[in-house]
Image (cartoon, grey):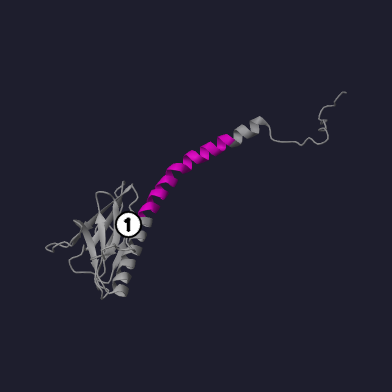
Amino acid sequence: MTLAIGQRIKPAKGWKRGFTLIELILVMGLLVIITSLAAPAMSRFIRGRALDSEARRMAALIHAGRSRAVSEGMPMMLWLDEKRGAYGLEEETPPKNGDRDAETLAVDESLEMAAVNAAGTAAITFQHLPAIRFLPDGTVDENSPRAIRLSDSRGHALWLVESDNRMGYDIEDTDKPE
């Protein structure tokens, strides 16, 4: 069988034309280049999301603590274990069998947290840890930390700052709380 120039060989029945090895290598090379360019930006995005997500999770627990104090008519404590990177919520004076609704959460290991008290105030503690005390009337005890600082390894920080009416904490994206 002789082929003229430009004439194509017809594939056998049942055989389909696919990609050549060269085409597959080129596509894989392009994917590697695109991934290597996008990976650093993606990792920065994910780290930033961890800080934002943790601030929102802590704000939600603060809201839950205030709600529990009002609904159960007893003070609630939101404690902060800065060294272990954990925080939680439980009754100030739990029953003998413990607080069934107590919660303990771990901070993302790439983040740090710190309680900031107003100058000249005695800090509230719960089990020797800094704590926010929610009163049954829905307010935050005046000796509770004024702010909580969450920061990542790059030095970016989000603050949970006590609201002016002492009814909760607001998230602020500033270098220092106002």
Picture coordinates of residue 63, whole percent (x, y): 33, 67
Give the magenta-colored segment's residue range: 28-51
Question: Which residue matches tag 1?
Answer: 104
Picture coordinates of residue 60, whole percent (x, y): 35, 64
Q: Secondary structure at mark 1?
A: strand
Q: Is residue 129 visible?
A: yes
Q: Name the quadrant of the N terminus.
A: top right
Which residue is most to the bottom? 137
Picture coordinates of residue 167, whole percent (x, y): 27, 72
Q: Main secondary structure of the magenta part?
A: helix
Which residue is most to the top? 2
Q: Is residue 158 visible?
A: no
Quadrant for residue 8, please give it.
top right
Quadrant for residue 80, please give it.
bottom left
Which residue is most to the front? 96
Residue situated in front as seen by the camera: 163 or 128? 128
